[in-house]
Amino acid sequence: MQNIYFTPGPSAIFQSVYQHTKEAFELQIHSISHRSQQFREIYQQCYQGLKKLLNIPDNMAIVFTASATEIWERLIWSCVENHSLHLVNGAFSKKFYQTAQQLQKKPSVYQSNFGEGFEIDKINIEKNIELLALTHNETSTGVSMPVADIHALAEKNQHAITALDMVSSAPYPNIDFTKIDTAFFSVQKSFGLPAGLGVWIVNEKCLKKSENLEKKGLLTGTYHTLTQLWKFFEKFETPATPNVLSIYLLNKVVEDMLKIGIENIRTQTEQKAKKLYDMLENHQHLQAFVKNKNHQSHTVVVAESKNGDVSNILSGLKQKNMIVGSGYGDFKNNHLRIANFIANEENHIDILIKELQNY
Ligand SMILES: *Cc1c(COP(=O)(O)O)cnc(C)c1O
């Protein structure tokens, strides 16, 4: 019997991926040159599909890397001379901050307790901040940043590049891409694909910044600098050999999502999330880790055990072929992390809820 995965990355596969992969092999996609017209068409279609799905304006490029972690590094290298500011409330936003430290920049951090969001009115962003690092959905704790807060911070701080990690929520949040400067995700979470591709959406303000750093003689990286990635994007190519199969599959899945309709995807995501949070509100032993409803994630629902241990639940579910994420880091034994991505279909969420009610 096959498992049903509710893990927040790698995650359940979007239902059509099996068929698309079969077709890709029949078409020998894995062997085509990344300097061929066939590849350029795949890249271009993928770009146009993502633009349509996420409502991305014409002046933004979409480039590919190997992972979102790689994009953290590229962003800091390409767009920060000294000062980035990171809003940190969990392990992933913290790693983005640490990347800037490792690259020997002078990042600052605005931290809230894990499990809590931010009161944005209290955040003072100095004029010397070059990049503001925001995480829409903190996958380690299930805290989400309201989209209105993201827009407000970006509008108020136009001196900085606003960068948005949307790895575990895209394409769910309805982001106004004319307000922010760059955003990114990897495909093994809400896009329901095998891992191995980072997708980086980036505007000309970021490009200009990295060109300026290069003019000053600063190191912005080697093979995947933003200026190189952008130059190749203009002809729908990549500097290095990319994961062609994954770009092909992303294009196919985006086509499928366009058929479902982004509005339907958003409504379904909210309906399924509501079912999960309602279950937690009425549960004897479990409760939502994030208490403020405004900050509760719709795509990664984190439950904490009232008596401190979830290992029996995890193993009980596993016996029924349901795989749920355990807690992240220090929360390993007392949290459950439940992915509510597009591939986590409503009937599967219903089965999981029914099973969880037995504990
Ligand atoms: C998983 C995750 C990442 C890292 O993604 P990789 O593709 O593994 O590099 C970054 N940010 C968030 C919020 C994530 O959930």
Image (cartoon, grey):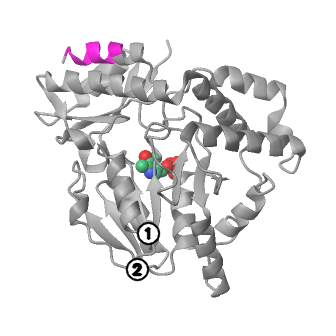
Amino acid carrying label 2: it is Lys
The residues colored magenta run 350-358
**Percent coordinates x, y for residue 347 in the rendering:** 40, 13
Answer yes or no: do the residues labelled 1 and 2 have beta carbons within 8 Å?
Answer: no
For label 1, being within 8 Å of ligand 1 is answered no
**Percent coordinates x, y for residue 25 in the rendering:** 79, 28
Q: Is residue 16 above or below residue 205?
A: above
| Residue 286 marker | none
Pointer 2: what residue? Answer: 106
Specify few, some or many for label 2: CA neighbours under 10 Å numbering under 14, 14-19, or 20 or more: some
Q: Is residue 23 above or below residue 239?
A: above
| Residue 158 marker | 1
State left or right for residue 27 relative to residue 253. Answer: right
Camera-nearest residue between 223 and 162 = 162
> What residue is shown at x 72% (from left), y 66% (from top)?
228
Amino acid carrying label 1: it is Gln
- The part of the image, by quadrant, that contains residue 133 is bottom left
> What residue is shown at x 45% (from left), y 55% (from top)?
164
Camera-nearest residue between 209 and 300 = 209
